[in-house]
Amino acid sequence: MGSRRPFFSTGAVLGVTLLCAGCGFTPFGRTIADIRLWRGDQALHERKLDAALVEFREAVKFDPQYYDAQYKLGMVYKESGDLEQAATSLQAAVRLDPTQIKSLFELGEVYRLLDKMTQAIRAYAMARDLDPHNFDLHYRLATCYHQTGDLEQAVEAYREAIKLEPQNAYVRSNLGAALAAQGKPYEAIKAYKESLECNDAQPIVLVNLATVYLNQERWETAHLALRKAIELGPELSSAHERLGYCLWREGAYEAAAGSYRRAIELDAKNAVAYAGHGVVLMTQYLDAPEKVELRDQAVEAWHSSLEVNPNQPKLRELVEKYRSKHERPTLTLDE
């Protein structure tokens, strides 16, 4: 008789599977996880996100300590829009291998999308410490610091990013915005001008530059920057709104009113433009008190601004001060 072959029943194999699923690393669990990971990659290649999600979940179930499985599961969750689950899986991936920049970066991205800036900053900073010459990490850190109001850290991070990509116009313009928010107008002007030297076709940067000039009461200089912004971006509502303010300060009331109206035409939710238009109309009324319609139009413009943005206490005071006050008629049922 020949030698007998060892016999394994289907149930025995399933028993091993059940024992390995969800446990720590075993050669068998890693093998099954590799198969599920391969299937998930194939599904992902075919853009079948639901199928990929199933496979990567199974891979993690068979080997929870498998970095690639946790990372890929997190990425599919992210692409599917399930950011909370994405964060959980990417956290697991980072715990398994804290030296992987890609998982730290993606974890930071997910936290940023969830508006959890403190956690995002922590993840980006860990990745930056591993790769201090990575432009994207410095830039992401800078924008997160900027958004949370930590302007000093934002400025430092923007400057580090600029060292790595000196010709990046967008980082320089963001640096200008952070410096302006810090109350450093001349440093902000320098950053905005350097951004425009890198790319002169940036109407919004010209608007930001003009705003600094306006704050310095440099009307003519601001006017020139705003005209250039409108030439480059004629549909930019904020450019027309800022020009309206500039013209008002220059005493050109009709032109100012026209700029504000154009800003409103381009963006019906531009609360600042409504408020500014009201200021121009009220200024004209105060110069000619007999033109009561100008006063009423001004108040109506302020009402429109408050409908868009109710959080304007000073504007509410102006409305109350200048609105027409009519006593309501009293009705009586007496004979």
Image (cartoon, helix red, strand yellow):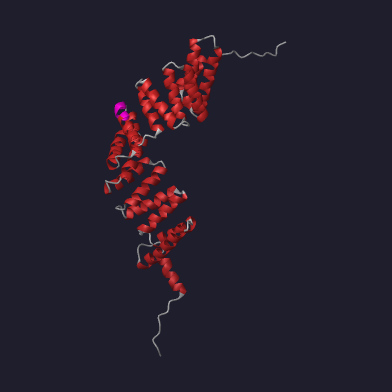
- Across and down, in percent, residue 64 comes to 38, 59
- Across and down, in percent, residue 282 comes to 49, 15
Q: Quadrant of the C terminus?
A: top right
Is residue 185 rendered magenta in the image?
yes
User: How many numbered badges does the structure rendering display?
Assistant: 0
Our reading of the magenta stretch's main secondary structure is: helix
Toward which corner of the image does residue 171 lie, by quadrant?
top left
Q: What residue do we see at 38% from left, 65% from top?
A: 29
Q: What residue do we see at 54% from left, 9% from top?
A: 290
- Left or right: 318 with respect to 125? right
State whether residue 118 is above or below residue 243: below
Q: What residue do we see at 45% from left, 70% from top?
A: 14
| In-front residue for pair 46/52 | 46
Toward which corner of the image does residue 124 lie, by quadrant?
top left
- Left or right: 146 with respect to 13? left
| In-front residue for pair 163/61 | 163
| In-front residue for pair 121/278 | 278
- Across and down, in percent, residue 133 comes to 27, 46
Is residue 158 rendered magenta in the image?
no
Q: What residue do we see at 48% from left, 23% from top?
A: 259
State whether residue 16 is above or below residue 82: below
Q: Quadrant of the N terminus?
A: bottom left
- Left or right: 188 with respect to 284? left
The residue sitting at the bottom extreme is 1
Highlighted range, magenta: 184-189
State whether residue 131 is above or below residue 203: below
- Across and down, in percent, residue 210 comes to 38, 26
User: Is residue 324 in sight in this rendering?
Assistant: no
User: Is residue 287 in sight in this rendering?
Assistant: yes
